[in-house]
Image (cartoon, helix red, strand yellow):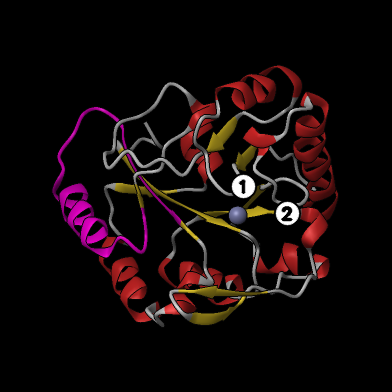
Amino acid sequence: MFNGKTKAITFSYDDCTVQDVRLAGLFNKYGVKATFNVNSELLGKKNELIRKGVRVCHDKLTEDQIARVYSGHEVACHSLTHPTLQDIEDDNEIVRQIEEDRKNLEKIVGYDICGMAYPNHGRDADRVADIIKSRTKIKYARTTNHSYNFDLQTDLLQFKPTVHHDDYDDLFRLAEEFLSLKTDEPKLFYIWGHSFEFDILNDWDKFEEFLKLISRRDDIFYGTNREVLLG
Ligand SMILES: [Zn+2]
């Protein structure tokens, strides 16, 4: 149960780019809660990506923006520098990428951090998940493998989000299904992505339409990842 409710919705956004300012503003406007996954050694760095033939800004927020922009939400780890952890042979380096990121972020936000999202992707992560479990203070880690359902999961260290936001057909289909769902069992709708992706197709309005649809429902708890996964 989530604060006495059987249904919950949460969001997870990666990379800490400048578009998070606009996204957090939208989350605040609709009263929903998110978790933002941050690479602490990349803060303040300028970058540009080409996606779908479009040049898109991938500048990171600066350290002094973090606490303010993400106020009311959760900050979680995304590793120090965004390597694919599964490709790192040295276990100690995996621990360093996670634990040093966690400590840096705790200093910035002033609270305990217990979550992360795998950088790049979350495939073939059994070994990394074991390391996270035995050698870090991380309690949940989100992969990029989708579940397309609302069932609670037992393996929180290889957690599968329901759907990526830019899969709009599934996003809206799942939203309708979730909103009409009557359940005695706890059910979770978990959406993830990157805010810079809204600049690629300029589909901010479409995402706002989704937020309008799913927000302000009395039978749904809107919480951060930590609140919905760890209680
Ligand atoms: Zn990332």
- Give the SS element for disc 1: loop
Q: Residues within 10 Å of mark 1 (few under 14, many from 20)?
A: many
Residue 119 — which label?
Answer: 1
Residue sitting nearer the eye, 58 or 23: 58
Viewed as shown, does residue 136 lie left or right of 171?
A: right
Residue sitting nearer the eye, 32 or 151: 151
Residue sitting nearer the eye, 109 or 165: 165
Q: Residue at x 52, y 39 (%)?
A: 122
Can you say whether 24 is above or below 74 in the image?
below
The response on whether ligand 1 sits within 8 Å of label 2 is: yes
Query: Residue 222 in the image: x percent, y percent?
Result: 41, 51
Can you say whether 75 is above or below 53 in the image?
above
Q: Is residue 231 visible?
A: no
Task: State which quadrant residue 79 falls in.
Answer: top right
**Circles 1, 2 touching at the beta carbon (< 8 Å):** yes
- Give the SS element for disc 2: loop
Q: Amino acid at mark 1?
A: Pro
The response on whether ligand 1 sits within 8 Å of label 1 is: yes
Q: Residue at x 26, y 39 (%)?
A: 149
Q: Residues within 10 Å of mark 2 (few under 14, many from 20)?
A: many
Viewed as shown, does residue 125 lie left or right of 66?
A: left
Q: Amino acid at mark 2?
A: Asn
Taking the image in four quarters, ligand 1 sits in the one at bottom right
The residue carrying mark 2 is 39
Q: Which residues are magenta?
A: 164-192
Query: Residue 103 in the image: x percent, y percent?
Result: 83, 41
